[in-house]
Amino acid sequence: MSSNKESILGAVPFAITVLLWNVPFFLGGIVVEGNVLLEVIIGEAVIFSGILLVSHLRGRLGRLYLISSYISMAILVTLVETGLWRFALFSAVAFLISIRFFLTSRKRLDFSTGTLAFLIFMLILFLSTSLRIVHSSLTGTGATGYLFSIYNNSSPAGVPFTYAYGIVAGLRGVTLTLSPLTAVFFPLIAYLTADNTMLIVKGSATGRTVSATGAVVAALACQCENTIGILSGTVSSLALSILPFFIFLSAGLLIATNVYLHNPIKMKLPRIKTWVVVTAFLIILAIEFLIVSTGLVYDLALFGLVSFLSIISGFLLGMVIPLKRSIPVYSVIFAFAIQAVMFWPHLISAALVTPSVFEAYNISGLVAGIILSLSFRNRSAMTKVGLVELIFSMETMITAIFLYITLFSLSLFNGFTEIAVIDFSVFILLLSLPLMWFSNIYLLSVRAFGS
C-alpha cells in the first residue's frame, strides 16, 4: 500500500511542472485560435502520462525530472530573453520542483543520460526546423505569443505527413512546431540515442577485450547510434512522402539496439562459400549493366546505386583473389579517399556526360572495394567488423551532409534539381543505414563474447 502511495506522490511533482509550463496559455497572454488549447491539453495529458508511466515502470524518474528541469530552464531563458517577465516566475518554480525531485530520486547514469538526451532532443528540434528563431510581430493584439493549428495557414494537402495535425506555439521570435508524430518520436529517439550511448560507454570496460580496443569499439558504436538519432531530425524537415519512414526506421533501430544492450546474445555469421560470392558478384554486374544500358543511370539516385554496387562488387572480387598475405591496415585510407572523391558533385556530373570519366569512376569504386576486402585478410573479427562499420558510416555521414546542405538550397550538383539531390541522398541512406546498424550490433557482440 505504501509503495502505491509513493508511486502517486512521485508523479505529482511532474504533473505540477507540466501545469506550470502551460500557465502562459491559461492567463490569456497568448492568442489561442479555435479549439487548439483543448487539443494541446489532451495531447499533453496523453503524451506526458505515457512518458511518466514508462519512466516509473523502468525506474527512470530521476532522468525524467532532470530532463524536465532542463526544459523548464529553457522556457525560463526564452521568457526572460523575450521580455515576458510576468510568466518567468512559473517556469522558475517548475525548474526548482524538477531539480529537487531529481536530487532525491537520481540513480547511476541518470545525470549523463538525461543531459545527453536533452541536448540531442534540442539538436533534433533545430535540425528538423521544428524550433526556429523568426521575426514575429504581435503589436496591437495585446498578446505576447500565439498558439494555432498548422492548418490555419496551410491547406491539409500542403502539410508534410511528419507535421500532420501540427500545432504552432510562438513567443516573440521563438517558434515551436510539433505534431502528434514528432511529439512522440522526437523525445523517444533522443532518449534512446542517449541511453544507448551511455550503455555502450559503460560496457566498454567490461568486455573481454583490452581497454584500448574497447574504447575504439565504444567510439564506433556511439557514432552509429548518434548518427541514426540525429539523422531523423535532419530528414524530417523535408516535405517528401518517404522521409517519415526515417523516423520509424530510426526509432526501430534504436529500440532494437536498446533491447540488445540489455539482453546481449552472441552473434555468429555463417561462412560464405566461393560460389555464393561469385554468384553475388555476377548478379551485381548484371544489375549495373541493366541500369547503364537502359539509361536509368542518368537518374542521380540510380547513379548512386551503381556507385554503391561498384564498391560492393570490388569487395566481393577481393574475397576470391588468391592472396594469402594481408595488406597493411592503413591501406584502407586510400579506399576511404577514393570513396570520398566518388561523392564529389563535379565528378559525378562529369561521369554522366563523359564515358571515359564514367569508366574511371566505376573502376575507382571497384579498386576501393578490392582494397577494403584485401585489408580484411588475417584480421580479427573485431577489426573486420570495425572496418565495415567505418565504410557504411562514411557513406551515411557524407550523404547526410549533402541532404542537410540541400535544405538550404545550396547547389552542389550542376544540372540536377534539388529533389534529385534529395532522392540521391535518401537512396544511399536507405542502403547504408541498416548495414551500418547491423555491423554495429555485430561489433558489440564480438566485443562482449568474442568471435
Image: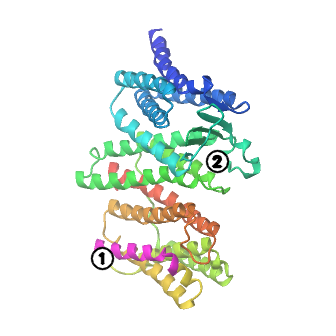
Range covered by the magenta-colored residues: 327-347
Dominant secondary structure (helix, strand or loop) of the stretch shown in magenta: helix
Contact between marks 1 and 2 (CB within 8 A): the answer is: no
Image location of residue 25, percent across then percent down:
61, 27
CA gap, disc 1 and disc 2? 47 Å
Image location of residue 209, percent across then percent down:
26, 52
The crowd level at tag 1 (other Cα within 10 Å; few <14, some 14-19, many 20+) is some
Q: Earlier in the sequence, mark 1 or mark 2?
A: 2
Reading the image, the residue beneath label 2 is 162
Reading the image, the residue beneath label 1 is 327
| Mark 1, secondary structure of its residue | loop
Instruction: State the residue in front, 405 or 181.
Output: 405
The image quadrant of residue 334 is bottom left
The image quadrant of residue 349 is bottom right
**What's the amino acid at mark 2?**
Thr
Image location of residue 394, percent across then percent down:
43, 65
- At a point 35% along the width and 54% down the height, the residue shown is 446
- At a point 39% along the width and 54% down the height, the residue shown is 223
Q: Quadrant of the C terminus?
A: bottom left
Instruction: State the residue in front, 92 or 418.
Output: 92
Instruction: State the residue in front, 146 or 66.
Output: 146
